[in-house]
Image (cartoon, rainbow, N blue to C red):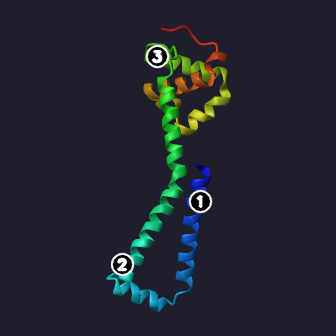
Amino acid sequence: MAGKSRSHTERLARILDNLGEHIRNGPGDELLETAREEGRDPAEVNARIKGLLRSVFKSYQQKTLADAKQGYQRELASIFEGHFHLPKTADGRRNWFQAVLIQAPQLQPAFTLQNRELSDLSDEDIEAHLKKLAQLGVLNAIRLPEEE
């Protein structure tokens, strides 16, 4: 089966090579005249092919971006689906977050760069950050206050 698909691939490659060679060697005026005789507008065909090539090229360029977005979404879903035992109250979660920053002060710039003041963090932000820290194993290394 592999030999068969290779022979089809080789055959297609030869056809494309021969077609490309014919187009390269054929006089431009002759090709334009042939297209017109077949009822095609060369300018329209040219515009359509350029549009198709641009579209394919743009999709190729954005594939990496799309893959990164999918990875980010998967990671985000993983974080939010994680089953971490966090305090039930917003004050309790804020106390945990502050305990992390006190015991691991090297982490504070990561949160203050994104948010001018730590007091500006919403309860949802605090919870999301705690889940990320838990997933990274940071909460395991921190002595956390008792839940309220």
Q: Secondary structure at mark 3?
A: helix
Residue bearing the label numbered 3:
91
Circle 3 or circle 2, nearest the eye: 2
The kind of residue tagged 1 is Ser
The image shows residue 25, relative to residue 119, as above or below, that is below
Q: Residue at x 57, y 65 (%)?
A: 11
Q: CA distance from mark 1 to mark 2?
A: 35 Å
Q: Of the two numbered discs 1 and 2 on the same chain, state the one appearing first in sequence.
A: 1
- Is the C-beta separation of discs 1 and 2 under 8 Å? no
Q: CA distance from mark 1 to mark 3?
A: 69 Å
Number of residues whose C-alpha sits closer than 10 Å to that of mark 2, classed few (under 14), some (14–19) or many (20 or more): few
State the residue in front, 8 or 63: 8
State the residue in front, 92 or 40: 40
Q: Quadrant of residue 42?
A: bottom left
Q: Is residue 90 left or right of residue 5?
A: left
Q: Of the two numbered discs 1 and 3 on the same chain, state the one appearing first in sequence.
A: 1
Residue bearing the label numbered 1:
7
The image shows residue 7, relative to residue 118, as above or below, that is below
Residue bearing the label numbered 2:
44
Q: Secondary structure at mark 1?
A: helix
The kind of residue tagged 3 is Asp
The kind of residue tagged 2 is Glu
x and y, in percent, of residue 132 in the image = 55, 27
- Is the C-beta separation of discs 3 and 2 under 8 Å? no
Q: Residue at x 59, y 59 (%)?
A: 7
x and y, in percent, of residue 9 in the image = 57, 60
Number of residues whose C-alpha sits closer than 10 Å to that of mark 3, classed few (under 14), some (14–19) or many (20 or more): few
Number of residues whose C-alpha sits closer than 10 Å to that of mark 1, classed few (under 14), some (14–19) or many (20 or more): few
Circle 1 or circle 2, nearest the eye: 1
Q: Residue at x 59, y 18 (%)?
A: 99
x and y, in percent, of residue 56 in the image = 48, 62
- Label annotation for residue 82: none
